Every structure is written in structure tokens, then in C-alpha cells.
Image (cartoon, grey):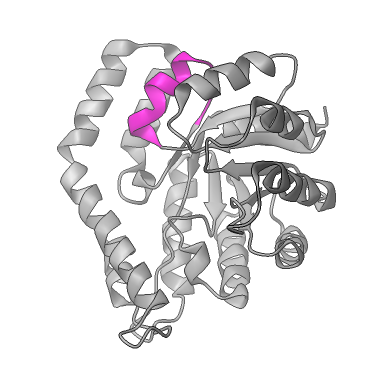
């Protein structure tokens, strides 16, 4: 295992924060506000930031905007944490995004789940493996389905450039079987459904979790992570109580981001529109 791969896997065992993408009143990506957010998250000690992830509205962004988010995130983090650049869409587009992100300084590439409605699990696995082959930095697969077989997951984990898999299904029976079947492989299995689901994921062998909650309260997410790693159930319960106490604020943020995502993607006439103020305000909570 290379030092770079070891470093990425160590970061995946921590918190993989997914920053929101802020917009100005004109609907364009607000790089100044994004820089402020990334500096705050990296300075808080978040281990890995997934630039242009789902919470960052990857599928609402143009390819040029994704590149802008990648570059801004990498520069703003200033080497304080791992930056995993999210890529996706067609294989050609995903490879091009990955090349540009790596050239800009991304430490890892994370591929969104392929959205082709006609691609079966084996073909979707092939998509991830093709990107892992093409990437010159460690690769992370973001799997959002429980239709993959244990064999499909093992094929992913066995690839020498796959650092880990972000397992975003709540099918814990499948995850437990997958982890048992890949005990001989070094890939990290990350809790994709975030803090609320992390305890049962950890109980069956997952490590690390993703978080959109860090956009508002990174310190609470870090407290949850510390408790999970230490096995301190009382401390973990206290951290979750803190999280529940601010759930309404986090829910408000989530709803604003989701509402904005819909507004950007679909106008009243079914065409795209560029109205972005709500998300920008949400980041400044």
C-alpha cells in the first residue's frame, strides 16, 4: 500500500463532509462564500471534504461549475484535509472531470452512483472500475443501491486503486455480509447515510461516515465521531442528544438546499432556471 493510499483510507475512517454549494443572487456559484465555508470546515478538523457531492448539488451544476467547485475547494482547504473531488454522469465526462480535478490538486476521486436507468448492477460496477483504472489518485465508489450482489461489491473492493466504498443503502444485512466477504481486502466501508445511521454501521464493521450536518455544526459531528471510535456509548448518546437539539435547524438547512436544487433544475416551464439566493443564505446560518 502506498503512503497516498494509506492517507486516503485514514481520512475515510473519519468524517467525510459534503459542503453545500452557495450561490449569489444571480444564481452563479459564489466562490467567495464557498471559500469561507471550506476554510471553516478544514480548520475545524473535518478529515475529508467531498467537493460537489450530493449536498453540493452535483447534478444541478454544469460541468464548468463542477470544475469551479473542485478548484475552489482545493484552494480553500490549503492542504489541511483530504479533498475528494466528486465526478459522474457519462464515463467520458467523469474521466474528464477526474483528470482536471487531479491536475488542480485533488487527493482522491469519488464517483457518484451512475444514473443510467438501463444499467444493471454488474454494468454499474464496471463503470466504477473503469474510473478507478483511469484515476491516478485513490478512488472512492459511492454506491446508493442494495441491488449490487456481494460479488459486485467484492469486485470493487478488490481493485488496487479503490480506497473505499461509500455504502449509502440502509440494508445492514447486506453490508454485514459484504464486510464479512471482504475481510481479506483493505478497502474501507464508509457509512453513507451520515451521523444518524453511524452507530449500527460501526457495530457491523463500517468505519467513518459522511455528513452534510458539518455545514452547520462541525463540532457536533466531530464529537459523534470521537465517541464512535472510542466506543464510549454515553458520550455518543450525549452527542446525539446535541444533534437532536439542533435537528430543526439542520432540517431547515436541508429543506432550503433541496428547494433551491429543485428551483435550479426545473423552472415553471420545465426548463432550467438560475435563482440561487436561498442556498447562499442557508450557508451563513
Residue at 62% over, 54% down: 114
Residue 28 seen in the current view = yes
Question: In the image, is residue 191 above or below residue 113?
Answer: above
Residue 229 seen in the current view = no
Q: Nearer the viewer, residue 60 or 31?
A: 60
Tell me where residue 264 sits by quadrant.
bottom left
Q: Which quadrant is the N terminus positioned in?
A: top right
Tell me where residue 179 sits by quadrant.
top right
- 205 part of magenta stretch: yes
The percent coordinates of residue 105 (x first, y second) are 72, 57
Residue 10 is left or right of residue 171, and the answer is right
The percent coordinates of residue 271 (x first, y second) are 42, 85
- 62 part of magenta stretch: no
Question: In the image, is residue 102 above or below residue 188?
Answer: below
Residue at 47% over, 50% down: 18
Residue 60 is left or right of residue 255, and the answer is right
The percent coordinates of residue 110 (x first, y second) are 64, 49
Residue 150 is left or right of residue 45, and the answer is right
Residue at 83% over, 31% down: 2
Residue at 30% over, 85% down: 268
Q: Which quadrant is the C terminus positioned in?
A: bottom left
The percent coordinates of residue 149 (x first, y second) are 64, 30
Residue range of the region highlighted in magenta in the rendering: 194-208
What is the count of numbered marks?
0
Q: Nearer the viewer, residue 175 or 11?
A: 175
Question: In the image, is residue 86 above or below residue 43?
Answer: below
Tell me where residue 99 sits by quadrant.
bottom right
**Predominant SS along the magenta part:** helix
Amino acid at each position: 500500500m502506498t503512503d497516498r493510499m494509506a492517507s486516503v483510507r485514514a481520512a475515510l475512517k473519519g468524517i467525510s463532509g459534503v459542503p453545500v454549494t452557495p450561490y449569489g443572487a444571480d444564481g452563479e456559484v459564489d466562490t467567495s462564500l464557498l471559500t469561507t465555508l471550506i476554510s471553516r470546515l478544514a480548520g475545524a478538523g473535518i478529515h475529508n471534504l467531498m467537493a460537489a457531492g450530493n449536498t453540493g448539488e452535483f447534478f444541478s451544476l454544469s460541468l464548468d461549475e463542477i470544475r469551479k467547485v473542485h478548484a475552489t475547494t482545493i484552494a480553500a482547504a490549503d492542504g489541511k484535509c483530504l479533498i475528494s473531488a466528486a465526478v459522474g454522469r457519462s464515463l467520458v465526462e467523469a474521466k474528464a472531470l477526474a483528470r482536471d480535478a487531479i491536475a488542480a490538486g485533488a487527493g482522491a476521486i469519488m464517483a457518484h452512483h451512475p444514473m443510467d436507468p438501463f444499467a444493471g448492477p454488474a454494468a454499474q460496477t464496471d463503470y466504477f472500475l473503469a474510473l478507478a483504472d483511469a484515476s491516478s489518485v485513490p478512488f472512492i465508489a459511492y454506491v446508493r443501491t442494495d441491488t449490487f450482489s456481494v460479488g459486485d461489491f467484492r469486485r470493487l473492493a478488490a481493485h488496487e486503486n479503490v480506497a473505499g466504498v461509500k455504502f449509502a443503502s440502509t440494508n445492514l444485512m447486506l453490508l454485514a455480509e459484504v464486510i464479512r466477504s471482504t475481510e481479506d481486502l483493505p478497502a474501507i466501508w464508509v457509512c453513507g447515510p451520515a451521523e444518524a445511521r453511524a452507530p449500527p454501521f460501526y457495530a457491523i464493521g463500517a468505519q467513518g461516515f459522511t455528513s452534510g450536518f458539518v455545514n452547520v455544526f462541525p463540532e457536533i459531528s466531530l464529537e459523534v465521531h470521537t465517541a464512535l471510535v472510542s466506543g464510549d456509548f454515553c458520550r455518543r448518546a450525549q452527542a446525539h442528544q446535541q444533534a437532536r437539539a439542533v435537528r430543526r435547524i439542520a432540517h431547515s438547512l436541508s429543506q432550503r438546499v433541496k428547494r433551491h436544487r429543485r428551483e435550479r433544475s426545473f423552472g415553471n416551464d420545465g426548463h432550467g432556471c438560475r435563482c440561487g439566493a436561498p442556498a447562499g443564505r442557508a450557508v451563513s446560518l
